[in-house]
Structures are given as C-alpha cells and as structure tokens.
Image (cartoon, rainbow, N blue to C red):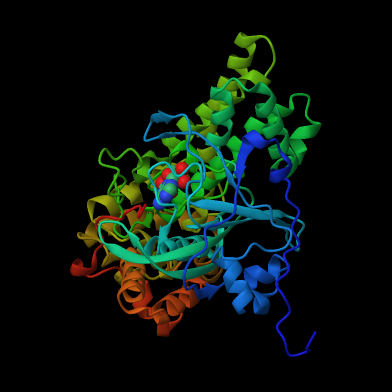
Amino acid sequence: MNLHETPSVFFPFDNSYARLPDRFFAKLTPSPVRAPQLIRLNEALAEHLGLDPESLSSPEGIEILSGNRVPEGAEPLAMVYAGHQFGNWVPQLGDGRAILLGEVIDRDGVRHDIQLKGSGHTPFSRMGDGRAVLGPVLREYIVGEAMAALGIPTTRALAAVTTGEQVAREQLLPGAILTRVAQSHVRVGTFQFFAARGDEEALRLLADHVINRHYPDASGSDHPYRALLDAVIARQAQLIARWQLIGFIHGVMNTDNMSIAGETIDYGPCAFMDTYHPETVYSSIDQMGRYAYANQPRIAQWNLAVLAQSLLPLFGDDEDVAVAQAQDSINRFPGLLEAAYLSGMRAKLGLVQERAGDTKLAHDLLNCMAENKADFTLTFRGLCDVSAADPEADAAVRGLFEDPVAFDCWAGRWRERLDQEGNSDDMRQTAMRAVNPAYIPRNHLVAEVIKAATENGNFALLEKLMTVLASPYEERPEYARYRIPPRPEQVVHETFCGT
Ligand code: AMP
Ligand code: MG
C-alpha cells in the first residue's frame, strides 16, 4: 500500500443479533444513493468505537455511511418488532427505513449497534419510502449529542450524510442518512412482536440475548427473566427522571420507541421546553397530549406494563403467580422514578441533605414557574448565581418571572432551607452549575440550523451549535446568544416527525 493512501475502512464487527434465528430480522443491503456527501463525522465517538475517523471521512468511508458500499464483516439486516403507537396495537412494525450494519465493541468493552437510518426500503417499510429527510436527521444528531453531553443515556450520532437525492414529503426535501450508534436497538416492541405470536422460544432467545448483552447480573438470579424486567424498570426510572429534570419531551413514547437498554431512542418531534409548563406538547401528531411533559412518567409505566405482559410466558407455569410478580415489579416503578427525580431535584436546588419538605419546595418552585411563564433552563441556571447572603443577586432570576414577587416568596423559603445546609455559597454554586446546564438545544436554535442546511446547504451554524452543546455546563460569554430563550417571533410551537 502507498503510505500516503488513506487506510481502507475497517469495522471490527462481531454481530450477535445476526446470529439469532431468521425470524428476528430480514437480511438485506442498503439501497444506493446518487451523490452522497459527508455533513459531519463524530470523530471522538468513532475513536471510542475503535474506528478510524480519517478513513471514515474518505470517499470509501462516505460510500459506507451512505449505504452505497457494505463494509467487510457487516451483516446488514432490518429488525422486526411490533408496538403500541399512541396506545393502538400494531402487530408488525420493524425497521422500515433503518438497516443494522453490525455490532462493534468500544474501548470500554461495551457492545454497540451501528445502524444506518434512511437507507432505503425494507420488508417493513409499509407505505413509507425508506428514506429520511435532512431536517429530522440533523435534529436527531443535534439533540442526541446534546443529551450525551448532558450525561443522559442516549443513542449517538456517528455521522450524517446528504444523499444528493430529493425525498418527497409535503414538499421535496433533501435526503440524508444518519449513522446511529446504540447499545442495542431492541425495544419493548421487539418483545411484543414474539409475545403476540405466542412464539415462546423466540421470546426466550430474545430475553437471553438482552440479559447477556445489557443485564449480565440478571443471569445469576434465581429468576433471570423477572430480574430482567426489574432491571429494565430501574433503568427506565432513571432515564425518565433525567428527562423530567432537564425539561426534555420525547414526543413519541410508543412502545416501539422505548429501548430495552434504557437509552433515549428515536428522536422524532422531540423538544426541550423553553417556558415551563407541565402540559407542554410540541409534536404535531400528539393532538391529545398523550406524550406531554408531565405524562412521561405515567406513559413509561404503561409501556413497562406492556413489557411485563410480554415477558409473562417466561415467568413460570403458574399464571397467577406470574401476574402477581409482574404487577409487583411494575408497581415499584413510580417509587423508583420519584426517588431518582427527588435526588436530582435536590442537586438542582443545591441541597445535599434530605429533608421532609424538599419535595414541596421543588413543586412550589415549578408551580410558580408555570404560573409566571419562567424559562425552565434559565431559572435553574439562574439559581446557581444566587448567593444566599445577598438578595440583590436575585435580580436576574426573579426577572424571569412575570410576577417577580412570587419568586421572592419562594426564594425566601429556599434561603432558609439553604441555611440548614451550612455549605459555603461557592461550593453550592459550583455543584449546582454541574447539574443545571446553561445550554440546551433550544428549538429555535435547532430550527435555525435546519433552515440554513435545507435552504442553503449551509452547515456552519450546525458546527457552531455542536461546539456550544458539547460543554453544556460551562458558560462562555461568547456563547451568550445560545443561552437565551427565543424572542416571541422565534418560538417554535410545533415539531414534526418528518416521516
Ligand atoms: P418512527 O415514528 O420513526 O418511530 O417510525 C415508526 C415506524 O414507521 C417504524 O417501523 C419505522 O421504521 C417506520 N417508518 C417511519 N418512517 C418511514 C419511512 N420513511 N419509510 C419506511 N418506514 C418508515
Ligand atoms: Mg421508532
């Protein structure tokens, strides 16, 4: 090989899902696209996965990231699953526009799926074209990477390419493909698919695969499948608590969009709240507010009950006992979530000790924010600046409230509570700034990036936004524009699936 040539692309694939029986997937290759161009490669993630960023961004790499070439060792397949969409049962869904290339093991020994999203027709495409549009691909890239930087479990974006083709939606839009990385793409809906068919053998194989891959501790339990359910419930409780604490609204919490590994997955019409209100909904397809911010914990429990139901055949022959066990597990979810939420909320408020009135103190702040249309992110970040000794330092944060006096009332109680902690302001402020971000992917910022990319092929704003969001807790004067809420004319009221 010529020393100046880029090394050819190498993925150290080890494809455990592809070794499951044929009825778990359809094997097929991605459909080629006309003129792929790389938008962005996540170099740090590539390196973490043991991939070479330079070769991935070479022409050969771009051919792979666009589905025009299947890399050595890949076993491309579309996974089958079912699901409840907005509560309605759909017996067969599956990857309609995504193809799993294979799995690699990262530098920490964690296995990851490498999937192309938007890579063409599959047997599960139903009426869809198997393609993805640039806007939603950028949204998933931005929001997913922002979540990762915020420390919230999520699928990741390895790369995005444009395809050089137009995709027909309400209008013609540029096509794109996201390369997505997940601990796995097994969903609640994957279990539902086999449970609904009474295919107990497949159910067991799937459960064993998941235990092996994500919950190895469960295999040592007396009841591995019950331990599996409990472990999934625990991870989801942590995850949903994190969403609530950061003001994230998923938008489409269908059972087929809930990951068994406990990662945030399938970013569609998702959004971060600007002004706090518990009933906030952005998704244009969520007319009833089923997936509104405040409903997310309840919906997660509903989805987990569906998972429990699907696992019942593995819980033993005595149906009554199995149902009672599953019910017991499900009933523990609200308590787990509440505990994770309260512990996170204490940290957001700078409280280390646990006191009985803390839940009420937090709820009263949130109510006051809702009544006074305060910005969620700025309020908590603003509290970091408040100094317990000096009421004057309240000015910025109290100005976020329509009636600043309402904030003053609450702040008085908060100060009394802080006094009981006995920590220095400095320590408290540093700790609070590590959990209350200054920067989130605000909708108007995401919309601005998508508009520039779609209308002008301009990706400079994307690069800038990704830089800002990579260090969400670290405030920089030069990023002031990224911190502030939208002006009235910039407010995004609705987000779309883009399917
Ligand atoms: P989502 O709303 O992205 O979670 O997708 C729900 C289901 O519709 C999944 O089975 C997808 O694979 C499928 N789907 C979404 N968009 C398309 C598309 N453009 N072509 C084919 N299938 C799609
Ligand atoms: Mg989905």
The percent position of residue 22, horizontal first and vertical second, equals 67, 36
Answer left or right for 205 relative to 498.
right
Compared to residue 3, the image places residue 87 above or below, namely above
The percent position of residue 221, horizontal first and vertical second, equals 78, 29
- Residue 151 visible in rendering: no
Answer left or right for 383 relative to 157.
left
For image coordinates 27% across by 65% down, the residue present is 400
Compared to residue 457, the image places residue 405 above or below, namely above
For image coordinates 37% across by 78% down, the residue present is 457
The percent position of residue 410, horizontal first and vertical second, equals 32, 54
Q: Nearer the viewer, residue 380 or 196?
A: 196
The percent position of residue 357, horizontal first and vertical second, equals 44, 42
For image coordinates 76% across by 62% down, the residue present is 12
Occupied quadrant, residue 194: top right
For image coordinates 63% across by 23% down, the residue present is 199
Compared to residue 251, the image places residue 141 above or below, namely below
Q: Nearer the viewer, residue 313 or 7?
A: 7
- Residue 204 visible in rendering: yes
Q: Quadrant of the N terminus?
A: bottom right
Compared to residue 147, the image places residue 456 above or below, namely below
Number of callouts in the render? 0
Answer left or right for 416 relative to 226.
left
